[in-house]
């Protein structure tokens, strides 16, 4: 999940932190000391939760996943998937392995895999984002609805419920150009301090081993890493280790377990009414620009609207949170280009520094308008090309700026204040050298990348995804009351929520401890498998409440929502 604009280690010639945002979100309900809103759960949802959660087929799935063999299989799959590097917009290696496992190991037919190696979903109208293909990995649990004589559809697409977790990870930033791309999973005793540099991480001698097929080798190191603990204190006392690998916490355990849940539904013949799609989505982190969910929801970046071409009626994210409000952002990477690489001409670093200085003077709507929603901006990274040879000037510099708010109106205000500062910095440097803007001898600008996360503030917490998410938790004892946090997050869910599709978040992970999310030193320690199973039970219950369910006794729990999903843009096909 992305909670800060550029969480990677910053390598910059000039970095200025101008403003930050604190995003508050809890797993369920308001955290201590934070306001929350009570949802009103409809009686049919309460009844559906009880029937589904205790259904014999569902309970058989839960019992099966509670075995030691199932816990080991989940753990091994996680270790084998998390070592596959998956930078945003370069997720094809991980997506390919998920596709392979779905068909060869998890019991699905090729027709049930809804995504392709080339990144195309034929039914979507958004298969290219920022000029690049989208490497999602999705599988369907087919429902019965399409076979009904009275079934409704949107341009051929019958209703579906989406359960998704992202498969991209911040580090490494790029796939290696050659050699084995696999990430080494390092193991470190708690008695040793957390590593401070990549060199320290690489020097740790203990690591997990994998065979030529990418399967984890169950040796003594594996046995140590596989120990289960309740918390960090117990892990430190009981010989636990920090398991260093990018994506340990954010968010491969949940995403891997989503496909385990899909396979378990298939094995135990769980039959929904509406289709349920389970997806590993691309592009949630860094410059991924939410590409995965933009494809699934047909989000047009220029129009700022979603066509929902697949007719999704509810979205369940696996990034945790349990929130309904989403911080939007505009993100720019602007390049300042020098006319020629001479040290005595207009300077790209100086132009960029002038732009940063001008941005630093900008006041946000929060500063200027009493009662305006929290609006912030950050200069996240400033970097320059090295001179082509000694004695020559810097050819270009790039500046990344992030603007955030929960409201589109205030986002536009801060964008309108900041965007002119890029040119103002270039103009100031041109004027210093007597050059005209736009001339071949002056500093010029090039927009390298523009990112958009749409903002959304819920008018009500009462929608079908929230109801199912909360009531499944109440039914299974995970929460005590139907409260929704008033905090905001910045997640994949920004896109479905902005499109009008009800959304709620869970997690399928279990960790005893962990830290370093988005850092090269991200680590975790294995938590109780029973927690994973309880969370799978809850996610399954919530998804079936919305989709409807053919119960073991022959009755049908009807879908909790109508068959036509919401959208903010219609399309013609």
Image (cartoon, rainbow, N blue to C red):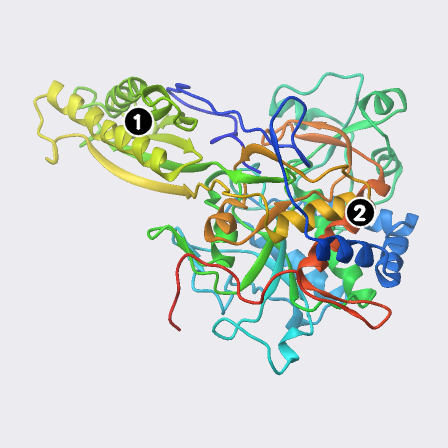
Q: Quadrant of residue 229?
A: top right
* Residue 164 point in image, percent of width and height: 62, 52
Q: Position of residue 321 (x, y in %)?
A: 63, 37
User: Which residue sits at x=23%, y=23%?
Assistant: 351
Between discs 2 and 1, the one toward the N terminus = 1
Q: Above or below — where is 308 with respect to 473? A: below
Q: Is residue 260 visible?
A: no
The C terminus - image quarter: bottom left
Q: Is residue 378 left or right of residue 480?
A: left
Would residue 545 appear left or right of 504 to someone viewing this image?
right
Q: Quadrant of residue 219?
A: top right
| Quarter of image, res 253 | top right
User: Residue 133 at what x, y percent from top left?
Assistant: 46, 57
| Residue bearing the label numbered 2 | 475
The residue tagged 1 is 387
Secondary structure at numbered mark 2: helix
Q: Is residue 46 left or right of residue 324?
A: right
Q: Residue at x 76, y 17 (%)?
A: 192
Distance, label 2 to label 1, CA atoms, is 63 Å
């Amino acid at each position: 999940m992305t909670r800060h604009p550029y969480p990677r280690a910053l390598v910059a010639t000039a970095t200025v932190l101008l403003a930050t945002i604190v995003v508050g979100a809890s797993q369920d309900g308001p955290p201590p000391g934070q306001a929350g809103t009570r949802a009103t759960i409809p009686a049919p949802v309460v009844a559906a939760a009880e029937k589904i959660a205790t259904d014999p087929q569902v309970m058989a799935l839960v019992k099966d996943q509670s075995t030691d063999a199932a816990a080991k299989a989940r753990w091994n799959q996680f270790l084998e998937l998390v070592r596959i590097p998956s930078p945003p917009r370069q997720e094809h290696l991980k997506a390919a392995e998920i596709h392979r496992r779905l068909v060869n190991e998890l019991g699905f037919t090729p027709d049930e895999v809804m995504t392709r190696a080339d990144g195309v979903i034929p039914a979507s109208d958004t298969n290219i984002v920022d000029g690049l293909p989208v490497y999602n990995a999705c599988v369907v649990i087919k429902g019965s609805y399409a076979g009904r004589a009275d079934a409704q559809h949107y341009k051929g697409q019958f209703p579906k419920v989406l359960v998704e977790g992202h498969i991209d990870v911040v580090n490494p930033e790029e796939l290696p150009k050659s050699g084995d791309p696999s990430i080494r999973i390092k193991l470190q005793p708690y008695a040793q301090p957390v590593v401070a540099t990549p060199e320290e991480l690489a020097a740790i001698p203990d690591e997990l081993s994998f065979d030529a097929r990418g399967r984890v080798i169950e040796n003594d190191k594996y046995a140590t890493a596989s120990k289960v603990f309740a918390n960090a204190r117990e892990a430190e006392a009981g010989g636990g280790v920090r398991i260093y690998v990018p994506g340990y916490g954010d968010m491969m355990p949940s995403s891997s377990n989503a496909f385990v849940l899909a396979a378990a539904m298939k094995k135990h013949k769980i039959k929904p009414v509406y289709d349920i799609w389970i997806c590993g989505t691309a592009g949630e982190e860094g410059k991924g620009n939410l590409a995965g969910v933009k494809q699934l929801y047909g989000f047009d970046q220029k129009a700022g609207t979603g066509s929902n071409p697949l007719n999704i009626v509810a979205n369940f994210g696996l990034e945790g949170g349990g929130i309904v409000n989403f911080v939007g952002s505009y993100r720019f990477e602007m390049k300042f280009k020098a006319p020629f690489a001479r040290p005595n001409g207009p300077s790209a670093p100086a132009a960029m520094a002038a732009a940063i200085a001008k941005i630093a003077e900008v006041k946000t709507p929060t500063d200027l308008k009493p009662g305006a929603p929290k609006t912030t901006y950050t200069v996240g990274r400033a970097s320059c090309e090295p001179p082509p040879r000694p004695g020559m000037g810097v050819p270009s510099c790039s500046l990344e700026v992030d603007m955030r708010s929960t409201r589109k109106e205030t986002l536009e205000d801060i964008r309108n204040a900041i965007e002119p500062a890029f040119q103002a910095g270039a103009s100031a440097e041109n004027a210093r050298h007597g050059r005209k803007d736009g001339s071949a001898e002056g500093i010029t600008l090039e927009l390298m990348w523009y990112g958009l996360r749409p903002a959304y503030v819920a008018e009500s917490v009462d929608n079908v995804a929230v109801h199912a998410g909360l009531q499944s938790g109440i039914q299974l004892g995970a929460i005590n009351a139907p409260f929704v946090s008033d905090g905001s997050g910045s997640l994949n869910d920004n896109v479905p929520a902005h499109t009008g599709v009800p959304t709620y978040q869970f997690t399928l992970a279990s960790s005893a401890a962990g830290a370093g999310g988005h850092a090269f030193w991200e680590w975790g320690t294995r938590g109780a498998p029973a927690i994973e199973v309880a969370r799978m039970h809850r996610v399954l219950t919530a998804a079936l409440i919305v989709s409807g369910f053919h119960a073991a006794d022959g009755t049908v729990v009807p879908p909790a929502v109508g068959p036509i999903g919401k959208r903010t843009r219609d399309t013609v096909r």
